[in-house]
Structures are given as C-alpha cells and as structure tokens.
Amino acid sequence: MPQRYDAIVIGGGHNGLISAAYLARAGLKTVVLERRHILGGAAVTEEIFSGFRFSVFSYVVSLLRPEIIRELDLPRHGLDILPLDGTFTPVPEGMGRTPPKDGNGNPIGTGDYLWRVNDHGRTVRELRRWSKMDVEAYEEYGPLMVDMARFIKPILAIVPPDPASIDPRPLLPLGGLLRSFQKLTERQQAVFVQLMTMSAYDFLNQWFETDPLKATMAASGIIGTFQGVKSPGTAYVLLHHYMGEIDGAFRAWGIPKGGTGGISNAIASAARANGAEIRTEAAVARIQTRGGRATGVILENGEELEADSILSSVDVRRTFIDLMEPGSLDGEFEREVRRFKFRGSSGKVNMALDSLPNFTALPGEGEHLRGAISISPSVEAMEHAYDDAKYGRFSSKPYIDIVIPTLVDPSMAPPGKHVMSCFVQYAPYNLDPSLGGWDQQREAFGDAVVNRIAEFAPDLPSKILHRNVQTPLDIERTTGLTEGNIFQGELSLEQLFFSRPVPGWARFRTPIRDLWMCGSSTHPGGGIMGANGRIAAMELLKSKRKGGKVRAA
Amino acid sequence: MSGPRPETYWDAIVIGAGHNALVTAAYLAKGGLRTLVLERRDRVGGAADTTELAKGIRVPTLAHTVGRLRPSLQKDLGLARHGLSLVAPEVRVFAPSANAGAVTLWSDTRKTAEGLRAGSDRDANEYPRFDRRVRLLGKFLDELGRATPPDIKSPGLGDAISGLKLGRSFKGLGRDGSRTVLRVLPMAVADLVAESFDGDALRAAVAWRGVRFGAVGPWSAGTAAMLLTDGAGNDGGAAGETVFAKGGPGALSAALAAAAREAGAEIRTSATVTRITTKDDRATGVVLADGTELEARAVVSGANPKSTLIDLVDPVVLGPSLGWRAGNIRTPGVVAKVNLALKKLPVFPAAGGDEALLRGRIVVAPTIDTMERAFDATKYGRSSDQPILEATIPSLADPLLVEGAKAGTHVMSVIAQYAPYEIAGGWDAGRDAFGDAVISVLESVAPGIGKLVSHRQVLTPVDLEREYGLTGGHPLHAEPGLDQFFVWRPLLGQARYRIALERLYLCGSGAHPGGGITGGPGQNAAREILSDLRRR
C-alpha cells in the first residue's frame, strides 16, 4: 500500500523547499523528494576538496524575497547573509584614464581599475577619475533604477494572467499596475519601457561614457542568458538583478554564511519545523497519472507515493518530457514545452588557493578583494566573449565574476587558505562538434578562465591548490538543470511573465490536473528568489481552500 | 477654413517631400487645408527616387520595391490615374548559393512548397503553414498599424474605443493566435524560422526580412516582429512583397506629388527649413535658409524625429528631459546602397539560364550564421567583409529604365548590409572597399559579373545622412526595435503624431507604424491633423 500525502514536491531546490514549507505551514501532509544526497539543487555547499567548502553553483544572493525570509522566519533557522561590498574591475594597461597614484605621485600599480563600493561618496570620487559627466549621470541613474525596481516589485508577487482567456478576473492585477504606471513621470515610464525592450548596452549608453563602467554594469544583463550586452532584451535582466537591491544597500549582493547551501538548509529547517517530511536520495522516475490527473510518483527504487497534489520544482522539460509517460500530453502543449529555450551559457570554476592573488592594478590584500571582482574591462571584450559562444565555442577571453568568500566567511577554508568562486560566461551547452564535447574541453575551459584572470593577477596560477571546473554539461548532470541553464530556461522576453514557461500555462497549473509547477521555469524566473515556490504554494492552497480541504494559512 | 490669406500664411506646412510627407500633404489638401510642402533637395521623393546613373540609364536610388504601399491610399489618392503603374513578378525571392543551389520563393505558395520538396519534405509541408501564420499575425499587425497609438497617460474615450477595436482583432486571432503573437513578437527571427524549417538556406532567405534595414542580426530579439511587420498590410506572406513601380520608385513619388498638387497643395523644392518657430509651446511656422518666415496653423515634419526635435526646435522650448530623450532616439544606420549599370544580364548558374528567376529580389544570405557574422562587424565599427545582399534587376520588367542605353544594358540595385554609420577610418576612405566587397559577394553567385559593371554608385550611411537628411544614415528614420515600437515610436508620450509642441506633427517613418515605402505614417498622421484642425 503506497504511502499517501496531501502534497508531493519533486526536487529539493530552494523553490521546492519553499513551496513545501508553505504547504506544511497550511497543514498539508507534505513530502519533498530530492534526487541527490544533499538539499539545495543549485544552492548547495559542498566540500569538494578536503577542508575547502564551496558554493559549487549559485554563489551570491540578493533576490531572495524579504516576505519569505519573514514569513518562514529564516534567520531563526540559521540564515545569515554577509554583505559583499563593492565591485572591482581591473583594466589593462593603456585602457585606463588617469591611473591612480600614491602619495608621492607614483603609479600604485600597472594598469588601472574601476572600483565601486556601497559608500556612495567613495564611489563618486573614484568615478570622477574616469569621467566627470559619468559622476553626474551616476547620481541620477541610481535613484532612477531604484524607482524602476520599486515599480516592478509587485509584478514578482502576482500570478500572470492569460491574455488569451475570456475570463477578465486574472487581468485585474494588471489594472493596478497600469494605474501605478500612470503615476510615474513620463520619463520614468519611458525608461521602464526601455528596460523591458532594450539591450543593456544601449540602455546604459544613454547615461555613461566610461567603457569599463558600462561593461561591468551591463554584465548583470547577460548573467545566465545566451545573449550579449548589445542584444535587445538584456536590459530587463539588468533590472531583474537590480530588484534584490531595492530594500537598500544593506541587502545588496551578499553571501550566506556557510555558502549558498546555508540558505537551503535554513529553508529546509523551516519546512521541517512546519511538519514537512524531506527525503534525499529519493529520485522520482515517473509522475503517475490517471484520467488526465496526477495521482502520485514512482521513485527510481520502485517505491510508489500517492498524493492529492504534485508540485514539480524541476524545470519544465524535466517535468513533462522526462517524468511523464510519453503520449500523456496534449500535442500542442508538448510542442511548446520542447520549444522552451534553455541554452545554458555559463560555467563555474571553483578554486582552492594557498593565498590571495595579487591584482597588479591595485596590489595587496586590500578590501577590493572582499567584494565582487569583475573581469569586464570593456564592452568590446564582453561582445567578443559572446561571439565565441554564438558559433559554438567557449569564450577564449571570458567575462568572469569572481568572489572570494573566505574573506567574509573564513570558515569555508583552513586557516590562511582561501576559496575562490568564478562565474564564467560564455560556455555554450552545445559546443561545435569539431571540439568533441565538454568532456574533452573541460580543462581547456578551466585554463582559459585561469589565463584570463592571470592577465590581471599574474601570480594566480602559482597559488592554485585545487581547481574544480563546472561546465554546463556538469551542471546539468549534477543538478538536473536542462542544458545547464541556471535559470531553468532563458530569461528572454518571449519566455517571461504570461509566456513563462508556456503561453496559457503561466499560472503554475498544468494541463495535468493536480500537477503544479513551482520552479524557476515559472514566473518570475530564476535566481535565488523563491517567489516562484511561494506563489505556486499560495495558488495551490487557494484552489484547495475553495474545496474546503485546508484551514486558512 | 481656407479663405484668401497672405502668401506667408498656411493651414499646414509640411517639412520634406519624402513619400510619407507627400501622402500627408495630399490628404490635408483633399481635406481642404491650404498646404505647403517644403523640400530641401531639388526634387521630391526622398528615399523613393529614381536617378540617372549614366547617360540613358536610370536606377532606383535607394528603395527598389514598393509593394508595401497601402492599397487604401493608392485608391484615395488615385495614384493609378496619376501615372503609377505596378509590376509584380511571379518570383518573389531567388536566393542562390555559391554551390549553384538555390531557394526560390514564388507568389504561389504551393509552387514554392513543391520546389522545397526536393530539399526537405518537412520544409515543403511547413512552408504553407508558416505562410498562413505570417499572414494571420500580419493581419493583426496591420490593424495595429492603422490605429493611432493610444494615449496611455490620460486615456480618452477615443483611446478606449480604439483599444476595444484592437482588443477585438486581438481576440480575432483566436486563443492560440493571440498567445502566439505575444510569444513571437519579441523573438529572434532565427528562432522563429528554426521552429518551422530545417533547411538553412530557406531559413536565411525568409529571415532576411527580419533584419533588413535594422542594426540587428538574426539572433537579436525583436527581429521576428520586423519580419511580421514587413508582411503587414500587404500580400507579402512568408516570401515578402516584390513589386516594382514602372519608372522606379521615383514614379511613385511623382504620382503622389501630382495627387497632392491636384488636391491644391503647393510643393516647393530647394527650400530648406532651418527652424520651427514657436509661441508659448506652440508651433507657429518655419524659417527658411534664405530667411523667409512662413506661418501656419500646423507644422508637419516628414523629417526624422531626432533631427526634427534636435535640429529644428529651440532646445529651450524642447526642455532638458525631452531633449535628452530625443538625443537618445536610436538611429544606427547599417545599410549601404550599391547601384550598378551592367553591360549585359549577369549569369547566375543557380538560375540555370532561366531569366524569369532574376525578376524578383535576389537575396544573397547563404545561412543564418553568415548573416549573424556579417552583423558582428557592426559591433566593432567595421563593415562586413561578406555583406548580405538584396539585389534587383528592375530593367528586366521595366526596359524603359535603360531605353537610352546600348541594347542589352541592365541596371542592378543592391541593398547591402552591414555597413555601420561609423567605421574606423571613415566612409570616404572605406566606400570603394565596401563596393568591392559587394561585388565579390555577387561574384560568388554570378561569376563574371564584375566585368559587366560599366558604372557603379556606392551610397554609404554617411551619404544617406548628407544627401537625404537621414540622421545616422538610418533609412527607417529610427531603428525598428522593440524599444521604438507602437506606443513608444519614436518616444513614449510622443507617438500619436503630435510631437513635443502643440500643432507640431510627425508624419514620417519615425512615427508608428514605422519605415518602409508604406505611406502608413503619412496616412495616419493626416487623419489626426485633420481631426485637430477641424475641431476648432
């Protein structure tokens, strides 16, 4: 006799765990089934090399919705986010403006850098070295983007309507949006439209002239996408990454104590406290359906579980192509699912270091190493990196976002030693056949990353104790993210809001009754945000409450 | 409303005599307004022009087909009566490849499908479906194109009604159609064609219209919308329109000018407007280069929005915010025009001697990747060394173009991408090199064509700006991106043909529904201007 639950959540990533926590909180008998031996999906901390612990995949946090932190009381369950202050962009010799000098007027290092910190005054002073015009623009740009993020924030919390449906009720939240849109000044409205349609470069180019500034800011617009900084639509991703900052600089990008696994563990603890059951090494092989209705799952070990509702936090292709009985889907829906674009474009290189690297532009172990170090010296460099990927090669000189967590959380490595996390674009999931595939190219890719960083910190190679390279193929194999896309599907305009993941099915429900989606494939997309898991759980509870099955949460 | 008035006072002054401006002027004059058109050049037509390349040899100077021209305005303005005669060859697109293979798109969809069958059954079966889809979505976009963008700041009754109308035609698409349009518009055209077709040559031949005249590659988001818009309101479908005006596009402009004059409009050439005069944030007239001041109840600009606002309006009157936004209107020209006189008809091995195949648009865009690579150059301030080409040989259907020349002479009109407005070293140095690049691409599909060239004209984006006042050398006045579309073309809050000032109007390609030889913006603008001027 199979075990019976009110709700089964497939996948123990942050969204799955959040859904489970909310469902359990409402009194549903809930179980989470995770394929791996640890929880977190792409938000995991693992000791890859003895003594060195890594946020193997996702490595910084900023987007996690404050209402979730509050409602699930995550701090009490161990969530502790340490701020990352600033972004340091080294610039090669010859490309700088007026290289910084020391007290005696001697250049501090070779080459130049652009260093922005949360201390506005310092950033402005630094920026003045590059361009007085950009200083003025910066003063204007910051507040404007905060306004934009404030305006779009409610969208993160609504269930997308189906514009094709005749039922007007789901459109009501849009009415509210339209009204608040009309409250914006015409310029704000225009800027918002630009954010939804422009390329990150074109958008930023309206304000700024400093090349490394534009390149570094535009980089937020391509994270996790198969787009370049000059590709239309990337300005939205720029905004997407801005939303985490709207509660003020103190919630700007940070890293969870103990790595991103710390977030997953806190959520899991909250879920358990609410009575959810969480099982690891419980890989789901099949979602069982009867009469067009999901009834339960079969695990790879043959065990069967039954439930009134199934929530899948794995991506839309895994859910409907891999876990469903072939032929159990409506043809048009299946076509749309197969159409959904993943196109993983990023890789990750994790390093264990004997000591800190020395960046020639600003030598020493200063606080510039405590924030993000962005290898984005120019817009051209960013575009060249993208062009490589378009034609099936990993970037020979990639864009790299470097974080050294041990500087804010020494517990991640043995005393005096460090871990370095390198997020890399571009690394296209589909390589040109002539390259023979990622298993042949993995170390070459790792070398390209080390060499690129060594252009700015020549002593890095001598300090590497261990190196762990995560190609899109590895990301897919380990986490199950299709094609290694970190957002469970591209954040391209045609895959957002009411078209995410499938037009007409953006409301967390699916054509299979009692089967729900709660992962990043749904609105509002990826990043450690959690909104997806929360809204999906709320929608399911609402539908049940109608049936009078649960107490109001 | 048009009683006798001094020569210096008009109901409407139209700046520029491009095809949209002429359309507006004709409608305004028909509506009873005393209308004056002022053109800087010594001839009307703007980008719809026919000029003599060499003695007795005339070529379509910039645009070479006119099949997107709105049927309704052809009827309203009696263009046929004014001498417009159109030729539509059976072949729409002939896309030869270097290996003597080719994709041919006919006006007859079934015939096209049969031709594709040899390469791929799937492509042959999908093509008619794709064609129907393009036409269905094109129909909706045409209704969108005929509407004046709603005023979203303070929606009035009219906006509600037109909103409902659009809503109805949107629902008219049906459940799947309406979802499709929302999903497809922001897509990359490369993805759109890949959903239907396997053959890379077919994908490229169809995708070309998604990037034509735009500073985008087939992998850029929003290019699917450009493809669909190109087919909106005409018989384009999947293949795209291929219609020639007898005598070249200049004949269209002549017919429009004749229609405008017949309706009572006055057209002055070699009359350069240097400034739009204002009084209390209201346009009152214009000042000419020779100092002449002319007054009007309405000033209508056929020039592009950027130069209209930046060059012609006093910045103080415009204000810093709108000035900043106007300065940021994107006008990245990437198109060059190469016009050739040929001693005789070139041989395309892929055509197998069938001259009929050469009567449409000859598209040289071998694969999606070659298009994208050609585009890549623009990102680094270079012109493509292997540009994408759309060539026509109008003298095949219209021998009068070469009647004054030796027998056998033909003219070839080539739209070449990508040639960015700004290239390292500048265009005066780069012009001939790019012309050579175009010829060498032509050689790859028509060996020996280089030797047939008796005259060659290369018009770069810089020439387009100098000669035609197209800021940034953009033939569509403003980039047709998703960021300059419908309610925000050219700018949010300025998209209803009324721009910046009271009684100042925009009627050119920089306004909704955008560029190309459609007359759409001109026709829509006239409607709005007439309703404003009649209201009082």
Image: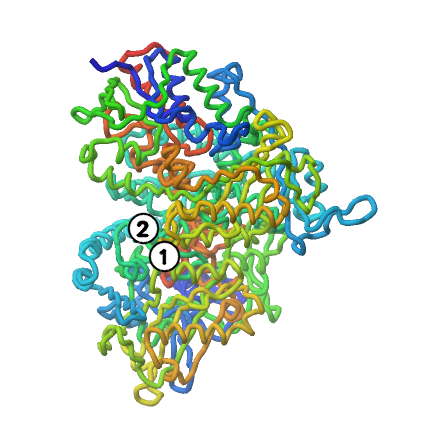
Residue labelled with disc 2: B192
Q: Nearer the viewer, residue A52 or A292?
A: A52
What residue is at 40 percent from the left and 67 percent from the top? B264
Residue labelled with disc 1: B210
What residue is at 36 percent from the left and 57 percent from the top? B210
The x, y position of residue A432, in whole percent, is: 38, 53
Q: A299 above or below A151?
A: above
Q: Which residue is situated farthest in the right direction here?
A: A104
Compared across the picture, whether B294 is left or right of A315 comes to: right
Labels 1 and 2 positioned on one and the same chain: yes
Q: Quadrant of residue B84?
A: bottom left
What residue is at 29 percent from the left and 62 percent from the top? B201
Asked which secondary structure carries label 1, the reply is: helix
The x, y position of residue A227, in whole percent, is: 45, 47
Q: Nearer the viewer, residue A151 or B292?
A: A151
The x, y position of residue B490, in whole percent, is: 47, 52
Crowding at label 1, few (<14), some or many (≥20) Cα neighbours within 10 Å? many
Asked which secondary structure carries label 2, the reply is: helix
Q: Quadrant of residue B103?
A: bottom left
Compared across the picture, whether B353 is left or right of A467 comes to: left
- Discs 1, 2 touching: Cβ within 8 Å: yes
The quadrant of the picture occupied by the C terminus of chain A is top left
Instruction: Report the amino acid beneath label 2.
Output: Leu
The label nearer to you, 1 versus 2, is 2
The x, y position of residue A467, in whole percent, is: 52, 39
Crowding at label 2, few (<14), some or many (≥20) Cα neighbours within 10 Å? many
- Give the label on residue A420, or none: none
Label 2 resides on the chain identified as: B
Instruction: Report the amino acid beneath label 1.
Output: Gly
Q: A360 above or below A4?
A: below
Label 1 resides on the chain identified as: B
